[in-house]
Image (cartoon, rainbow, N blue to C red):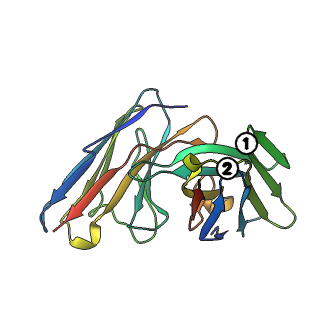
Amino acid sequence: SAVISQKPSRDICQRGTSLTIQCQVDSQVTMMFWYRQQPGQSLTLIATANQGSEATYESGFVIDKFPISRPNLTFSTLTVSNMSPEDSSIYLCSPRVGTDTQYFGPGTRLTVL
Amino acid sequence: GENVEQHPSTLSVQEGDSAVIKCTYSDSASNYFPWYKQELGKGPQLIIDIRSNVGEKKDQRIAVTLNKTAKHFSLHITETQPEDSAVYFCAASGGGTSYGKLTFGQGTILTVHP
């Protein structure tokens, strides 16, 4: 398994501002996924981040809105830019351990006013 | 791409009863099927997974079955306890252009009444 931490655990932000979410893993992982979970909904993949390469984004998500950094194999950040109330969600990082097993961080609960 | 359907959306059982949650998937190339449990205010926790070369896997009170021909897999919880109450998500790891990416079902809210 993996020990995953996210910062902040929750935040309340004003419309138009940006928030950077940090994800730290206790072991080196090649692939890191970022998900969004809207209230009462399932998980939707935002992007895949590999160390040393540009993140790849899923349909409906763009780099200008959700820039991602992956400076090393244990750390990644997701920024939610120019926020609106529709961005209020739980944001989760998910490292892949081994060939296919994915674990999830505790999540960052974001409320945009 | 992959599409995963999960049923039921809510499930209410008495303590000690069994609970079954079913999922179907669309991509025949999918080969990895995890199940996650999400408690209120927490991230999803991996509870069991199965790969396409296995038909059944069991871990104490939890078991998962996979029918590749019919493209469906199920989670079975026996002797349920109130602490099993949570939202459960199934997922499938797709093939082709979706290789390695998990697609999630819509979730099942399980309530175990003492």
Residue at the image point whose x is 42% and y is 43% from the top = A105
- Whether residue B105 sits left or right of residue B32 in the image: it is left
Q: Which residue is mark 1?
A: B61
Q: Which residue is mark 2?
A: B80
**Contact? badges 2 and 1 (CB < 8 Å):** yes
Q: Secondary structure at mark 1?
A: loop
In the image, residue A2 lies at what x, y percent?
50, 31
Residue A113: where, in percent of width, then height? Answer: 15, 68
Q: Earlier in the sequence, mark 2 or mark 1?
A: 1
* Label 2 environment density (alpha carbons within 10 Å; few <14, some 14–19, many ≥20): many
Where in the figure is residue B77, as x and y percent of width and height? 71, 51
Q: Residue at x 22, y 72 (%)?
A: A85
Secondary structure at numbered mark 2: loop
CA separation in Å, label 2 and label 1: 8 Å
- Between B38 and A97, the one nearer to me in the picture: B38
Front position in the image: B73 or B69: B73
Q: Is residue A6 placed above or below B9 in the rendered structure?
A: above
Quarter of the rendering containing residue A56: bottom left
The amino acid type found where label 2 is placed reads Thr
Q: Is residue A18 visible?
A: no
In this rendering, the answer to whether B55 lies above or below A15 is above
Measuring from the top left, give residue B59's x and y in whole percent.
74, 38
Direction from residue B111 to residue A109 in the image, left or right? left
